[in-house]
Image (cartoon, helix red, strand yellow):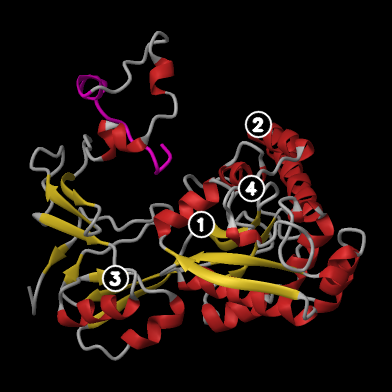
Amino acid sequence: MARWSYVCSKQWAVSHGEWDGTAATWQKFNNPDKERSYFHAHANGTGPFKLERWDPAAKYVLLARNDGYWRKPAVLRRVLIKAVPEFSTRRLMLQAGDADIIEPTRPLLSQLENIKGVRFADHLPRLATDPALFFTFKINTFANRDIGSGRLDGEGIAPDFFTDPDVRKGFAHAFDYEALLKDTFKGTAQRAKGPIPPGVPGYDARQPFYEYDLKKAESHLRKAWNAQLWEKGFKFTLTYSVGSENREAACRILQKNIESLNPKFKIDLRGVEWASYLDKAQRRLMPIFSRGWYADYPDGHNFVHNFYHSAGRYPSAQGYSNTELDAFIEKAAHEVDARKRKEHYSNILRLAFEDAPSIVTVHPRGVYALRDWVKGFADNPVFLDIYFYPLRKAYGDQ
Protein backbone atom coordinates (compact mmCIF):
# COMPACT_ATOMS: atom_id res chain seq x y z
CA MET A 1 0.00 0.00 0.00
CA ALA A 2 1.09 3.56 -0.63
CA ARG A 3 1.77 5.28 2.67
CA TRP A 4 -0.82 8.01 2.12
CA SER A 5 -3.68 5.50 2.21
CA TYR A 6 -4.80 2.74 4.55
CA VAL A 7 -7.30 -0.08 4.84
CA CYS A 8 -10.26 0.26 7.17
CA SER A 9 -13.56 -1.50 7.81
CA LYS A 10 -16.06 -0.93 5.01
CA GLN A 11 -18.93 -1.64 7.40
CA TRP A 12 -17.65 1.03 9.77
CA ALA A 13 -17.21 3.54 6.95
CA VAL A 14 -20.69 2.98 5.51
CA SER A 15 -22.26 3.18 8.97
CA HIS A 16 -20.83 6.70 9.23
CA GLY A 17 -22.16 7.91 5.90
CA GLU A 18 -19.27 7.05 3.59
CA TRP A 19 -19.52 5.43 0.16
CA ASP A 20 -21.08 1.97 0.04
CA GLY A 21 -19.04 0.99 -3.00
CA THR A 22 -21.94 0.76 -5.44
CA ALA A 23 -22.28 2.37 -8.87
CA ALA A 24 -25.62 3.86 -7.86
CA THR A 25 -24.09 6.28 -5.36
CA TRP A 26 -20.59 7.05 -6.63
CA GLN A 27 -21.44 10.51 -7.97
CA LYS A 28 -22.44 11.70 -4.51
CA PHE A 29 -18.98 10.82 -3.22
CA ASN A 30 -16.94 12.01 -6.19
CA ASN A 31 -14.44 14.66 -5.02
CA PRO A 32 -16.35 15.70 -1.86
CA ASP A 33 -15.35 18.51 0.49
CA LYS A 34 -12.90 16.87 2.87
CA GLU A 35 -14.37 18.58 5.93
CA ARG A 36 -17.73 16.91 5.29
CA SER A 37 -16.26 13.42 5.28
CA TYR A 38 -16.28 11.35 8.47
CA PHE A 39 -12.75 10.29 7.57
CA HIS A 40 -11.61 13.91 7.97
CA ALA A 41 -11.52 13.71 11.76
CA HIS A 42 -11.89 9.99 12.50
CA ALA A 43 -9.75 6.92 11.97
CA ASN A 44 -10.30 3.17 12.16
CA GLY A 45 -7.33 0.90 11.64
CA THR A 46 -5.49 -2.07 13.12
CA GLY A 47 -2.19 -0.53 14.23
CA PRO A 48 -0.55 -0.34 17.66
CA PHE A 49 -2.05 3.10 18.34
CA LYS A 50 -5.44 4.68 17.76
CA LEU A 51 -6.54 8.27 17.34
CA GLU A 52 -7.70 9.77 20.63
CA ARG A 53 -7.83 13.45 19.74
CA TRP A 54 -7.02 15.78 16.86
CA ASP A 55 -6.97 19.53 17.44
CA PRO A 56 -6.35 21.40 14.16
CA ALA A 57 -6.27 24.78 15.89
CA ALA A 58 -3.64 23.68 18.41
CA LYS A 59 -1.87 21.66 15.70
CA TYR A 60 -1.54 18.37 17.53
CA VAL A 61 -2.62 14.75 17.31
CA LEU A 62 -2.91 12.54 20.39
CA LEU A 63 -2.60 8.79 19.94
CA ALA A 64 -3.59 6.22 22.56
CA ARG A 65 -2.23 2.68 22.81
CA ASN A 66 -4.37 0.03 21.14
CA ASP A 67 -4.51 -2.71 23.77
CA GLY A 68 -6.26 -4.96 21.24
CA TYR A 69 -3.30 -4.86 18.85
CA TRP A 70 -2.53 -8.29 17.36
CA ARG A 71 1.00 -8.22 18.72
CA LYS A 72 2.08 -7.38 22.24
CA PRO A 73 0.74 -3.90 23.12
CA ALA A 74 3.16 -1.00 22.75
CA VAL A 75 5.10 0.19 25.79
CA LEU A 76 4.06 3.82 25.36
CA ARG A 77 0.54 4.55 26.56
CA ARG A 78 0.17 7.76 24.58
CA VAL A 79 1.97 9.63 21.83
CA LEU A 80 1.59 13.38 21.28
CA ILE A 81 2.53 14.63 17.81
CA LYS A 82 2.66 18.41 17.62
CA ALA A 83 3.42 20.69 14.69
CA VAL A 84 5.76 23.48 15.79
CA PRO A 85 6.98 25.46 12.75
CA GLU A 86 9.38 27.72 14.68
CA PHE A 87 12.71 25.99 15.19
CA SER A 88 13.58 28.10 18.24
CA THR A 89 10.45 26.80 19.99
CA ARG A 90 11.23 23.20 19.02
CA ARG A 91 14.74 23.63 20.36
CA LEU A 92 13.53 24.95 23.71
CA MET A 93 10.99 22.12 23.99
CA LEU A 94 13.72 19.54 23.37
CA GLN A 95 16.08 21.21 25.82
CA ALA A 96 13.41 21.36 28.54
CA GLY A 97 12.33 17.77 27.97
CA ASP A 98 8.89 18.83 26.76
CA ALA A 99 9.70 17.12 23.46
CA ASP A 100 11.36 13.71 23.26
CA ILE A 101 12.15 13.80 19.52
CA ILE A 102 12.27 16.60 16.98
CA GLU A 103 13.17 16.59 13.29
CA PRO A 104 15.56 19.49 12.62
CA THR A 105 16.63 20.71 9.23
CA ARG A 106 20.30 20.50 8.40
CA PRO A 107 21.15 24.24 8.49
CA LEU A 108 19.99 24.50 12.12
CA LEU A 109 21.41 21.24 13.44
CA SER A 110 24.45 22.90 15.01
CA GLN A 111 22.18 24.77 17.43
CA LEU A 112 21.32 21.46 19.10
CA GLU A 113 24.80 19.99 19.41
CA ASN A 114 25.64 21.38 22.84
CA ILE A 115 22.39 20.51 24.58
CA LYS A 116 23.10 18.04 27.38
CA GLY A 117 21.19 14.79 27.14
CA VAL A 118 20.49 15.04 23.41
CA ARG A 119 21.75 12.58 20.81
CA PHE A 120 21.30 12.37 17.04
CA ALA A 121 20.10 9.73 14.64
CA ASP A 122 21.89 11.15 11.62
CA HIS A 123 22.74 10.34 8.00
CA LEU A 124 19.61 8.22 7.77
CA PRO A 125 19.07 6.81 4.26
CA ARG A 126 16.12 8.24 2.36
CA LEU A 127 14.62 7.28 -0.99
CA ALA A 128 13.82 10.88 -1.76
CA THR A 129 14.34 13.87 -4.03
CA ASP A 130 13.85 17.12 -2.13
CA PRO A 131 13.70 20.01 -2.71
CA ALA A 132 12.53 20.26 -6.30
CA LEU A 133 11.21 23.37 -8.01
CA PHE A 134 8.19 22.93 -10.26
CA PHE A 135 7.22 25.38 -13.01
CA THR A 136 3.50 26.10 -13.40
CA PHE A 137 2.57 26.03 -17.09
CA LYS A 138 -0.98 27.35 -16.76
CA ILE A 139 -1.01 29.86 -13.93
CA ASN A 140 -4.41 30.71 -12.50
CA THR A 141 -4.87 34.47 -12.93
CA PHE A 142 -7.99 34.91 -10.79
CA ALA A 143 -7.20 37.40 -8.00
CA ASN A 144 -3.57 36.32 -8.25
CA ARG A 145 -1.07 38.92 -7.06
CA ASP A 146 1.88 36.55 -7.49
CA ILE A 147 2.11 37.27 -11.23
CA GLY A 148 1.99 41.07 -10.95
CA SER A 149 0.44 42.68 -14.01
CA GLY A 150 -0.24 39.31 -15.63
CA ARG A 151 1.71 40.39 -18.71
CA LEU A 152 5.30 40.30 -19.90
CA ASP A 153 5.81 44.03 -19.41
CA GLY A 154 8.47 44.19 -16.70
CA GLU A 155 5.85 44.34 -13.95
CA GLY A 156 4.61 40.76 -14.07
CA ILE A 157 4.50 37.56 -16.09
CA ALA A 158 1.89 36.06 -18.39
CA PRO A 159 0.07 32.92 -17.18
CA ASP A 160 1.92 30.85 -19.80
CA PHE A 161 5.34 32.30 -18.89
CA PHE A 162 6.96 28.92 -18.24
CA THR A 163 5.68 27.25 -21.40
CA ASP A 164 8.74 28.61 -23.20
CA PRO A 165 11.46 25.94 -22.78
CA ASP A 166 14.20 28.57 -22.86
CA VAL A 167 12.75 30.13 -19.71
CA ARG A 168 12.76 26.78 -17.93
CA LYS A 169 16.27 25.86 -19.09
CA GLY A 170 17.56 29.29 -18.17
CA PHE A 171 16.21 28.89 -14.64
CA ALA A 172 17.64 25.35 -14.40
CA HIS A 173 21.13 26.57 -15.31
CA ALA A 174 20.82 29.52 -12.91
CA PHE A 175 20.41 27.26 -9.89
CA ASP A 176 23.59 26.74 -7.84
CA TYR A 177 23.31 23.07 -6.90
CA GLU A 178 26.65 22.89 -5.13
CA ALA A 179 25.77 25.88 -2.94
CA LEU A 180 22.64 24.07 -1.76
CA LEU A 181 24.65 20.92 -1.04
CA LYS A 182 27.38 22.76 0.84
CA ASP A 183 25.60 25.57 2.66
CA THR A 184 22.21 24.03 3.39
CA PHE A 185 22.82 20.28 3.56
CA LYS A 186 26.40 20.59 4.86
CA GLY A 187 27.61 18.00 2.38
CA THR A 188 25.34 15.23 3.66
CA ALA A 189 23.04 15.03 0.62
CA GLN A 190 23.76 13.70 -2.86
CA ARG A 191 23.41 15.77 -6.01
CA ALA A 192 20.29 14.67 -7.93
CA LYS A 193 20.64 14.12 -11.66
CA GLY A 194 16.96 13.24 -11.95
CA PRO A 195 14.07 12.39 -9.65
CA ILE A 196 14.97 8.69 -9.17
CA PRO A 197 17.38 8.19 -6.24
CA PRO A 198 20.43 5.91 -6.59
CA GLY A 199 19.66 2.29 -5.80
CA VAL A 200 16.07 2.53 -7.01
CA PRO A 201 15.21 0.58 -10.20
CA GLY A 202 15.24 3.03 -13.10
CA TYR A 203 18.13 5.13 -11.81
CA ASP A 204 20.65 5.91 -14.56
CA ALA A 205 24.03 7.29 -13.48
CA ARG A 206 24.71 8.37 -17.09
CA GLN A 207 21.58 10.46 -17.49
CA PRO A 208 22.04 14.09 -18.59
CA PHE A 209 21.48 16.76 -15.95
CA TYR A 210 21.61 20.52 -15.55
CA GLU A 211 24.62 22.21 -14.05
CA TYR A 212 25.04 25.68 -12.62
CA ASP A 213 26.17 27.86 -15.52
CA LEU A 214 25.14 31.51 -15.60
CA LYS A 215 26.42 31.96 -19.16
CA LYS A 216 24.13 29.19 -20.41
CA ALA A 217 21.32 30.61 -18.27
CA GLU A 218 21.76 34.02 -19.87
CA SER A 219 21.89 32.51 -23.35
CA HIS A 220 18.56 30.75 -22.88
CA LEU A 221 16.87 33.74 -21.26
CA ARG A 222 18.04 36.07 -24.03
CA LYS A 223 16.24 33.81 -26.54
CA ALA A 224 13.08 33.38 -24.47
CA TRP A 225 9.81 34.78 -25.76
CA ASN A 226 11.36 35.92 -29.05
CA ALA A 227 14.01 37.92 -27.17
CA GLN A 228 11.32 40.04 -25.48
CA LEU A 229 12.01 38.61 -22.03
CA TRP A 230 15.51 40.03 -21.79
CA GLU A 231 14.44 43.47 -22.98
CA LYS A 232 11.24 43.83 -20.96
CA GLY A 233 12.13 41.89 -17.84
CA PHE A 234 9.66 40.28 -15.47
CA LYS A 235 8.40 40.25 -11.90
CA PHE A 236 6.68 37.52 -9.88
CA THR A 237 6.46 36.14 -6.35
CA LEU A 238 8.17 32.91 -5.35
CA THR A 239 6.39 31.36 -2.38
CA TYR A 240 7.80 28.83 0.09
CA SER A 241 6.24 27.01 3.04
CA VAL A 242 7.14 28.46 6.43
CA GLY A 243 9.26 26.08 8.49
CA SER A 244 10.78 24.27 5.50
CA GLU A 245 14.27 25.74 5.69
CA ASN A 246 15.68 23.50 2.94
CA ARG A 247 13.03 24.52 0.42
CA GLU A 248 13.26 28.15 1.45
CA ALA A 249 17.02 28.00 0.85
CA ALA A 250 16.45 26.60 -2.65
CA CYS A 251 14.06 29.46 -3.42
CA ARG A 252 16.56 32.04 -2.19
CA ILE A 253 19.34 30.57 -4.33
CA LEU A 254 17.16 30.75 -7.43
CA GLN A 255 16.01 34.29 -6.63
CA LYS A 256 19.56 35.57 -6.09
CA ASN A 257 21.00 34.08 -9.25
CA ILE A 258 18.14 34.99 -11.59
CA GLU A 259 18.15 38.59 -10.37
CA SER A 260 21.93 38.77 -10.85
CA LEU A 261 21.54 38.16 -14.58
CA ASN A 262 19.51 41.25 -15.42
CA PRO A 263 18.36 44.20 -13.27
CA LYS A 264 14.97 43.90 -14.97
CA PHE A 265 14.46 40.43 -13.47
CA LYS A 266 12.66 40.70 -10.12
CA ILE A 267 11.54 37.85 -7.87
CA ASP A 268 9.88 38.53 -4.52
CA LEU A 269 9.91 35.86 -1.80
CA ARG A 270 7.02 35.16 0.54
CA GLY A 271 6.50 32.45 3.15
CA VAL A 272 3.05 31.01 3.87
CA GLU A 273 1.73 28.29 6.16
CA TRP A 274 1.73 24.72 4.85
CA ALA A 275 -2.03 24.37 4.41
CA SER A 276 -2.21 27.60 2.40
CA TYR A 277 0.82 26.52 0.39
CA LEU A 278 -0.80 23.23 -0.65
CA ASP A 279 -3.99 25.03 -1.59
CA LYS A 280 -2.14 27.60 -3.71
CA ALA A 281 -0.20 24.86 -5.51
CA GLN A 282 -3.29 22.83 -6.35
CA ARG A 283 -5.10 25.93 -7.60
CA ARG A 284 -2.08 26.81 -9.78
CA LEU A 285 -1.64 30.20 -8.15
CA MET A 286 2.13 29.95 -7.75
CA PRO A 287 4.43 30.47 -10.76
CA ILE A 288 6.92 28.07 -9.15
CA PHE A 289 6.37 25.80 -6.16
CA SER A 290 8.93 23.85 -4.16
CA ARG A 291 8.11 20.33 -3.04
CA GLY A 292 9.79 16.95 -2.88
CA TRP A 293 9.01 13.27 -3.27
CA TYR A 294 9.66 10.46 -0.79
CA ALA A 295 9.15 6.92 -2.06
CA ASP A 296 5.82 5.24 -1.46
CA TYR A 297 7.51 2.10 -2.76
CA PRO A 298 11.09 1.60 -4.02
CA ASP A 299 10.62 1.73 -7.78
CA GLY A 300 11.39 4.36 -10.41
CA HIS A 301 7.76 4.51 -11.52
CA ASN A 302 6.79 6.11 -8.22
CA PHE A 303 9.11 9.01 -9.02
CA VAL A 304 8.79 9.54 -12.78
CA HIS A 305 5.00 9.26 -12.71
CA ASN A 306 4.69 11.93 -10.03
CA PHE A 307 7.31 14.19 -11.59
CA TYR A 308 6.54 13.83 -15.29
CA HIS A 309 3.27 12.04 -16.15
CA SER A 310 0.37 14.36 -16.96
CA ALA A 311 -1.79 12.50 -14.42
CA GLY A 312 0.95 12.52 -11.78
CA ARG A 313 0.94 14.40 -8.50
CA TYR A 314 2.99 17.39 -9.58
CA PRO A 315 2.31 17.69 -13.34
CA SER A 316 -1.41 17.85 -12.61
CA ALA A 317 -0.72 20.83 -10.33
CA GLN A 318 1.63 22.37 -12.91
CA GLY A 319 -0.69 21.96 -15.88
CA TYR A 320 2.14 20.06 -17.56
CA SER A 321 1.64 17.42 -20.24
CA ASN A 322 4.07 15.67 -22.57
CA THR A 323 2.46 12.82 -24.54
CA GLU A 324 5.82 11.23 -25.40
CA LEU A 325 6.83 11.15 -21.75
CA ASP A 326 3.42 9.75 -20.77
CA ALA A 327 3.82 6.92 -23.29
CA PHE A 328 7.28 5.90 -22.07
CA ILE A 329 6.20 6.07 -18.41
CA GLU A 330 3.24 3.79 -19.12
CA LYS A 331 5.41 1.38 -21.14
CA ALA A 332 7.97 1.18 -18.33
CA ALA A 333 5.25 0.48 -15.78
CA HIS A 334 3.95 -2.51 -17.76
CA GLU A 335 7.27 -3.89 -19.03
CA VAL A 336 8.42 -7.15 -17.38
CA ASP A 337 11.75 -7.44 -19.21
CA ALA A 338 14.35 -5.73 -16.99
CA ARG A 339 16.58 -4.68 -19.89
CA LYS A 340 13.74 -3.11 -21.86
CA ARG A 341 12.41 -1.44 -18.74
CA LYS A 342 15.81 0.12 -18.10
CA GLU A 343 15.81 1.47 -21.66
CA HIS A 344 12.39 3.03 -21.12
CA TYR A 345 13.61 4.81 -18.00
CA SER A 346 16.69 6.09 -19.83
CA ASN A 347 14.37 7.55 -22.48
CA ILE A 348 12.14 9.08 -19.81
CA LEU A 349 15.06 10.79 -18.09
CA ARG A 350 16.49 12.03 -21.40
CA LEU A 351 13.14 13.49 -22.50
CA ALA A 352 12.61 15.10 -19.11
CA PHE A 353 16.04 16.70 -19.32
CA GLU A 354 15.21 18.11 -22.76
CA ASP A 355 11.85 19.48 -21.63
CA ALA A 356 12.91 20.66 -18.13
CA PRO A 357 9.47 20.79 -16.47
CA SER A 358 11.13 21.07 -13.04
CA ILE A 359 14.45 21.51 -11.29
CA VAL A 360 15.66 18.58 -9.20
CA THR A 361 18.37 19.38 -6.67
CA VAL A 362 19.44 16.73 -4.13
CA HIS A 363 18.70 13.38 -2.57
CA PRO A 364 18.71 14.22 1.16
CA ARG A 365 19.47 12.13 4.22
CA GLY A 366 17.37 12.20 7.35
CA VAL A 367 18.19 13.32 10.87
CA TYR A 368 16.39 13.31 14.23
CA ALA A 369 17.39 14.82 17.56
CA LEU A 370 16.36 12.65 20.52
CA ARG A 371 16.58 12.86 24.27
CA ASP A 372 18.81 10.17 25.79
CA TRP A 373 15.88 8.53 27.50
CA VAL A 374 14.28 7.55 24.20
CA LYS A 375 15.04 3.87 23.56
CA GLY A 376 14.17 1.52 20.73
CA PHE A 377 14.37 4.04 17.90
CA ALA A 378 14.50 2.42 14.44
CA ASP A 379 14.39 4.15 11.07
CA ASN A 380 12.93 3.04 7.75
CA PRO A 381 14.06 4.81 4.53
CA VAL A 382 10.60 4.47 2.97
CA PHE A 383 8.38 4.98 6.02
CA LEU A 384 8.95 8.67 6.71
CA ASP A 385 7.28 9.00 10.05
CA ILE A 386 8.62 7.74 13.35
CA TYR A 387 7.62 4.15 14.10
CA PHE A 388 6.34 4.49 17.64
CA TYR A 389 5.60 0.83 18.40
CA PRO A 390 9.10 -0.19 19.63
CA LEU A 391 9.80 3.08 21.45
CA ARG A 392 10.04 3.38 25.20
CA LYS A 393 11.37 5.91 27.69
CA ALA A 394 14.02 4.75 30.13
CA TYR A 395 16.20 6.76 32.48
CA GLY A 396 19.66 5.97 33.80
CA ASP A 397 20.48 2.27 33.51
CA GLN A 398 16.90 1.17 32.91
* Mark 1 residue crowding within 10 angstroms, few (<14) / some (14–19) / many (20+): many
Compare marks 4 and 2 and give the one earlier in the sequence. 4
Q: Nearer the viewer, mark 3 or mark 4?
A: 4
- Residue 86 shows in this picture: yes
| Residue 307 image label | none
| Residue 336 image label | 2
Q: Does the segment drawn in magenta span residue 52?
A: no
| Residue at 65% from the left image edge and 50% from the top image edge | 139
For badge 3, the amino acid type reads Ile
- Disc 1 versus disc 2: distance between alpha carbons? 23 Å
Q: Nearer the viewer, mark 2 or mark 3?
A: 3
Compare marks 2 and 3 and give the one earlier in the sequence. 3
In the rendered image, residue 171, in percent from the top left (x then y), is placed at: 74, 67
Compare marks 1 and 2 and give the one earlier in the sequence. 1
Q: Quadrant of the rendered structure where residue 81 is?
A: bottom left
| Residue 102 image label | 3
Direction top: furthest residue: 24
Q: Nearer the viewer, mark 4 or mark 2?
A: 4
- Disc 2 versus disc 3: distance between alpha carbons? 42 Å
Mark 3 secondary-structure assignment: strand
| Residue 127 image label | 1
* Residue 186 position (above or below residue 167): below
| Residue at 60% from the left image edge and 66% from the top image edge | 238
The residue nearer to you, when weighing 148 against 64, is 148
Mark 1 secondary-structure assignment: loop
In the rendered image, residue 372, in percent from the top left (x then y), is placed at: 19, 77
Range covered by the magenta-colored residues: 1-16
Compare marks 3 and 4 and give the one earlier in the sequence. 3
Q: Does the segment drawn in magenta span residue 2?
A: yes
For badge 2, the amino acid type reads Val
- Disc 1 versus disc 4: distance between alpha carbons? 23 Å
Residue at mark 4 = 318
